[in-house]
Amino acid sequence: MREVRFGIIGCGLMGREFGSAIARWCHLLDLPFRPLLSGICDANPGLFPWYQNNFPTIKVATKDYRELLRSPDVDAIYCALPHNLHRDVYIEIVRAGKHLLGEKPFGIDLPAAQAIVEEIQKHPKVFVRCSSEFPFWPGAQRVIQAIQQNRFGRIVEVNAGFLHSSDLNPEKPINWKRLVEVNGEYGCLGDLGMHALHVPLRAGWKPKRVFANLTKIVAERPDGKGNKVPCRTWDNGTLACDAVNPFDGHPFPLTFRIFRIAPGETDTWYIEIHGTRYSCRFSTRNPKAFQFMEYSGGAQCWQEESLGYETVHKTITGGIFEFGFSDAILQMWAAFMDELVNGKTPFACARPEEALASHQVFTAALESQRTRQAIEVA
Ligand SMILES: NC(=O)c1ccc[n+]([C@@H]2O[C@H](COP(=O)([O-])OP(=O)(O)OC[C@H]3O[C@@H](n4cnc5c(N)ncnc54)[C@H](O)[C@@H]3O)[C@@H](O)[C@H]2O)c1
């Protein structure tokens, strides 16, 4: 059993999800490796007791991430910090020789993402991936299989997106994800966009050109101290893109909807692909339903298969049971470790080049919004 000793930098919402995934590693079957939580770092030490009470393996708990990077007890880092810190901290992690699963968007903007990727290229022995868990849902995996098998015939269109709704409430207090200086000029695109782009980018459908429609809907929010302050980040983005199917060279329209204000949606990830021979769609809104249509000249009938717990990495859960967010995190982490330890895995986590490609799309989207033109993606 190979043990990989992890440090978590950023012990907030996502840090705890990863801690919890370590705690139930026994859920996974037949893996010759396991993570061990040996270090935690956060600027707020008030978060430490939850970790320390649950993980007796922790050797370092610190406010200074460099202490984790110096520690001989840490092999790899999961980093879940606000976006303005990604560039400097990811670069230091890689320079320290620690493997990294870094949260998206992998830098606050394109220059930050480029600097991170350039540093990674200088350290080929360090293994780095970007967090993006939704492709590990069983329905998403069915879509990915159909892409790999080139089942669609001529692709008619592809629509993908990620939809939140809690910002519909104008009384929701502002936080760092709504501040341009911390979250970035991309707004919703940086915060949610990698989720929508991961599968299309893996399919080879990097947009060639993008026309963006970005909207700011709630202009100010409570600051939690009785005042209203400006909320300047983009709330919603619709990106109409030109893409090309690498199997046949034919162009097709690819549309992303990346919304913080999608009334009624909680955390909805979806993808639908329409083709002349085969179409399919999956949304986490209806998480068991995989819908598909085969067409060879007869009736055009969509079918729905109710999926159970069909996972990339085997688990103890019965095949008819339901899959959820924390299961996707566990599967993603298994993929990260599988690739780190074995050099390959059935479906790899988002690669640094894919994170960089998402930045190229978002940067073109910002320019499109400014100029109201369709912009070529670098
Ligand atoms: N994969 C996903 O589904 C998903 C979901 C939400 C957020 N995220 C990403 O995770 C990252 C973190 O988001 P979150 O929702 O966990 O945020 P969060 O605010 O809950 O946690 C961030 C933590 O970083 C700490 N921090 C800030 N500055 C620090 C510093 N200099 N040194 C040490 N700690 C510091 C904060 O105290 C906080 O606890 C972001 O990149 C975000 O985009 C990913």
Image (cartoon, rainbow, N blue to C red):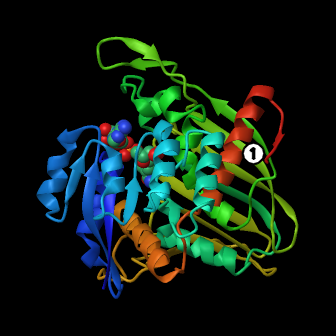
- In x, y percent, where is residue 46? 18, 39
Q: Is residue 270 left or right of residue 93?
A: right
How many labels sit on residues?
A: 1
Vertical comparison of 137 with 284: above or below: below
Q: Is residue 36 left or right of residue 204?
A: left
Q: Residue at x 30, y 80 (%)?
A: 317
| Residue at far top of view | 227
Q: Residue at x 40, y 25 (%)?
A: 174
Q: Residue at x 62, y 29 (%)?
A: 215
Q: Nearer the viewer, residue 306 or 28?
A: 28
Tell me where residue 353 sits by quadrant: bottom right
Q: Nearer the viewer, residue 56 or 267?
A: 56
Splitting the image into four quadrants, where does ligand 1 fall?
top left
Q: Nearer the viewer, residue 262 or 191?
A: 191
On the question of residue 212 being in view, the answer is yes
Judging by the rendered image, the residue that carries numbered circle 1 is 240
Q: Is residue 8 left or right of residue 117?
A: left
- In x, y percent, where is residue 356? 65, 52
- In x, y percent, where is residue 335? 46, 73
Q: Nearer the viewer, residue 183 or 158?
A: 183
Vertical comparison of 163 with 340: above or below: above
On the question of residue 267 being in view, the answer is no
Tell me where residue 140 sits by quadrant: bottom right
Q: Quadrant of the N terminus?
A: bottom left
The amino acid beneath tag 1 is: Ala
| Residue at far bottom of view | 30
Q: Is mark 1 within 8 Å of ligand 1?
A: no
Tell me where residue 189 sits by quadrant: top right
Crowdedness near tag 1: few (<14), some (14–19) or many (≥20) residues, C-alpha within 10 Å: many
Q: Residue at x 35, y 71 (%)?
A: 322
Which secondary structure, mark 1? strand
- In x, y percent, where is residue 33? 34, 81
